[in-house]
Amino acid sequence: MPQPERLTDTPEFRLQLPKGGGEARGYLLKEFGGNGTHKFLVRQGSAVAAEASPGLGDHARRLRAELRADGALVEAPADPARPKAPPCWVATRDIECNSSSAAAALVCGYSASGPDHWRTDEGYPLNDYLSTNWRPPRKAWLVRGSNVSGRNLVRQLWLREGIVSLAGAHLPPLEETDPTKSALRRFVEAGYEGAASYNQKQGLVDELHAFLTQMRVADTVATISDGRLHVGRITGEAEQTASPGGLSNLRRTVTWSPGSYAYEELPDEVQQRLSVQHDVVDLTGVLDALDGLIGRADDTDPVATDATGEPLTAERPAQRELSLPPVTDGLADDLLVHDRVWLEEIRELLVDEKQLVFYGPPGTGKTYLALRLAEFLGGGPEQVKIVQFHPSYAYEDFFEGFRPVEDPDTREVAFRLTAGPLRELADLASREGNRHIPHFLIIDEINRANLAKVFGELYFLLEYRTRSVRLTYSADDFALPPNLFVIGTMNTADRSIALVDAAMRRRFAFVELSPRTEPTAGLLARWLEREGRDPEPARLLDALNARIDDADFAIGPSYLMKPGVYRDGGLERTWRTKILPLLEEYHYGEGIDVAARYGLDSLREQHP
């Protein structure tokens, strides 16, 4: 009997049974089964679970019974090394199955997705080697093009010519219209060898696969340029063409809707998805919100300008030297900062040090200020990533490490080298065309973690930005890009700032935000004036902080800058449930009547 012909350019796949029950191996066949997918051959010697779940389909049950009856599946000998392993059978010959899912059901004893369960020795799913499977009738996508090697393709090319594009200068001619992810991975590994990290290559494979095979005609596409969202509809299949510098040689035609939408006026769920830091992002989850924007566009798009106010054109592209934009009066007014000079000093500290920490009591707006400054100086939320440290946070979480990835069905765990937020942002900042754009990492509660454990050899790079080190896990030679800035926040009320070592203090500039000094001291009064509210809460907060002996336990204004405070009874409720409990902790064990000393009635008597 002739041997079934194996599908070319596909490797052998394996499936690990749960609880140490052995392993099955097999490969795709060129012949198609009855359901229109490639048949799958389970190889001789493969382990097969002896127990079947109640939900296993009738066809799979009959196949297992027939194979047992004719001796193709026999009981596996006991393994003394695995006395608690579940009972299993072993295949005495190759077994041809109608599909990879039928093969997975045969092996596992329960209904299972073959494209997801069968994996290569490197851990890649069989799905990567198949053409595109079913997907929703219409999806939505974000494709970034405002900075491609320093050029704003959105204004210079996409909107004018009715296209959306990706750069693919290092890709060979693509013969398939829907290349598999496996084929794209081979092209990227060969074309970008030495030019990209493992994390950048994986991101590029995912983006190419989405652009070339997942997108469809009639899908919604969106992009951001100059702080505004443009939305359109894809009208053409992906094409590979020559382009200057290879900046746009993968293209799809698009009908762009007239006008655009200011980023800050978009729905919150849309803003959240737009902040994902990839060049191609699936926005299908907010498709309804994007559809709801159509018809409400502002047809008077602002002219893109540089920091001096001069318009940007195709002949006059944006500046390509790294710099932080100058502080504006508009930013100071928006942040309610009393003096623009204070913000200019923060900017200069970032230019000189690259890293700084805002520290102070709770409620002083440290995280809010860090995020707003980073978005302004970086040019948008896509250049900003935020993480929060905690006592169990480690180097593997922060930078990179081998992390366990569990199969949801078999419960088997495989360890894969995975990039953390710092590695992801550093790779993004160091990409060609991004190196003149500031990128910001916000580390909230930076003093909550064991900093030496989290940073590891990166401590050295924070101080010596022009040097590189050999990384612990990937063994790459790595340097922090000069356009990566770090802003941390510290809460001083828990005294943990005292635990920050000298190495940390040497590498970061420290800026205090205190309710007793500007710009925080008068913030609430300025906010109340802008909102047209009674100034009493600002007077009460000043009176409260005057009674608190320790500046580290002063109460910040953000507690009283929320809408709920100004509903009926809201101020009293906030004071009782948010502010007084903090002061109870401060005076714990001292026998002080906190409500009598710091309550609203007492403060109002002194400051009517």
Image (cartoon, rainbow, N blue to C red):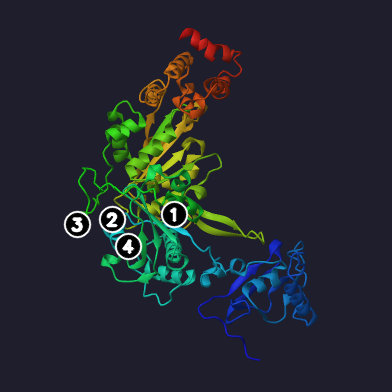
Most extreme residue toward the bottom, as rendered?
1
Q: Nearer the viewer, mark 4 or mark 2?
A: 4
CA gap, disc 3 and disc 2: 12 Å
CA gap, disc 3 and disc 4: 20 Å
CA gap, disc 4 and disc 1: 44 Å
Left or right of 418? Residue 323 is left
Query: Disc number at residue 114?
Result: none
Residue type at tag 4: Gly
The residue that appears at 59% across and 12% down in the rendered structure is 593
Most extreme residue toward the front, as rendered?
295
Task: Bin the neighbour count of mark 1 within 10 Å (Cα to Cα): few under 14, some 14-19, many 20 and up.
Answer: some
Which residue matches tag 1? Answer: 471
Question: Which one is nearer the viewer's eye here, 264 or 76?
Answer: 264
Left or right of 306? Residue 117 is right
Q: In which quarter of the image is residue 266?
A: top left
| Mark 3 vs 4, N-terminal side | 4
Which residue matches tag 4? Answer: 162
Query: Disc number at residue 315?
Result: 3
CA gap, disc 4 and disc 2: 11 Å
Question: Residue 251 in the image: x percent, y percent?
Answer: 35, 67
Q: Look at the numbered discs 3 and 2 and tell me whether their residues touch, using CB distance below 8 Å.
A: no
